[in-house]
Image: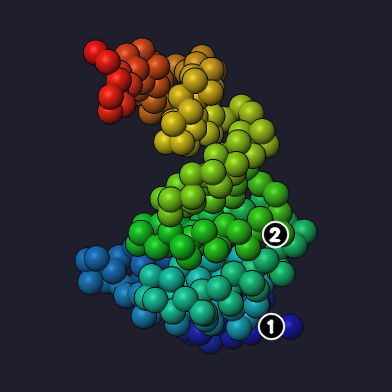
Amino acid sequence: MRQKCSRGTRAYPRKDAADWEVSGAIADIAMAPWGMGSTKTAEARLRCALKLVPDHLEGLNLLAQVCAQTSRHKEAFSLLERGIAAMATRPADLVLFGTALAETYEARKDFRRAKAVYGRCLGAVDAAELHNGLGYCLGKLGDLQGAVRHAEAASKLAPERADYLSDWAWSLIELKRPAEALPLLERAVAMDPANELARGNLDDCRTLLSAPAPRPRRRRGTPK
C-alpha cells in the first residue's frame, strides 16, 4: 500500500513517508530556538508518521518525549506502552526508547516519573542501562538500598562498564559503606584511568576511610 506524502503529490511507500516526516520533525525541533521550526509543527509531523507506521520507533520515541516535556504524562506513558509492545523482539531498541524518555523526565527533575519509565521497561527487558538509570532515580528519591541494588545489577550485567562500577560504589558511600565501595572504585579506575568521576569518587572514598573515627561521647556520670 502506498500513501501520499503530507507535502507534495508524489506517492511514497508508507515507511519512506514516515521516515521523511520524522526527519522533518527532528529538524523542526533543532531549529526551534532560532524561530525556524516549532515543537507544535514537529508534533504534527510525528503524529502523521505514526498514522503511516504505527510502530515507528523514532516517531514513538520523539512524540513520547514531546508529551513528557509538555506535561502530557498520560499520553507519554501510553506511547511508551505502544513502544514496549512494538519492540518486544527488539530489546536494544526498547532500551534506547525507555532511556530517552526517562532522561527527559530526569532533565525536569521528575525522578518519580523517570523511575516509573525505567521500572516499566525492566518488566519487558533486563538491561544494564535500565538498572543503572533506575538506581540513579532511586538515589535521588532517597531509596539508597534500592539504588545500591539496581546499581549492582547494572554492573553485573555489564561488568566492562567502569562508570557503572563507580555509580554502584557511590551508592554504597551514600549508604555509609565506604569499605565496600573502595575495591569497586579501584577496579573502575584500573579499567578506565581517564574516568575523572571514578577517580574523584576513589579519592573521596579513601578520605572517608582514613578519617579518624569520632570520639565517643561520655555518658553522664562516667568518670573522666
Q: In which quarter of the image is the C terminus?
A: top left
Considering depth in this image, is 25 or 142 the residue closer to the camera?
Answer: 142
**Residue at the image position 49 percent from the left and 50 percent from the top:** 143
Residue 22 appears in the rendering: no
State left or right for residue 208 relative to residue 91.
left
Task: Please indicate whether residue 184 sits to the left or right of residue 153 in the image.
Answer: left
Question: Is residue 184 positioned above or below 1 on the image?
Answer: above
Q: In which quarter of the image is the N terminus?
A: bottom right
Q: Find disc 1 in the rendering and name its residue.
A: 2
Q: Is residue 109 visible?
A: yes
From the image, state whether disc 2 or disc 1 is nearer to you: 2
Q: Which mark is residue 123?
A: 2
Residue 196 on image: x %, y %:
37, 24
Of residues 62 and 223, the one drawn nearer to the viewer in this rendering? 223
Marks 2,1: beta carbons within 8 A: no
Q: Dot 2: within a 10 Å radius of its alpha carbon, few (fewer than 14), some, or many (20 or more) residues?
A: few
Question: Left or right: 30 with respect to 59?
Answer: left
Residue lying at 50% horizontally and 24% vertically, measured from the top left: 181
Q: Of helix, strand and loop, which one carries label 1? A: strand
Q: In the figure, residue 214 lies in which quadrant? A: top left
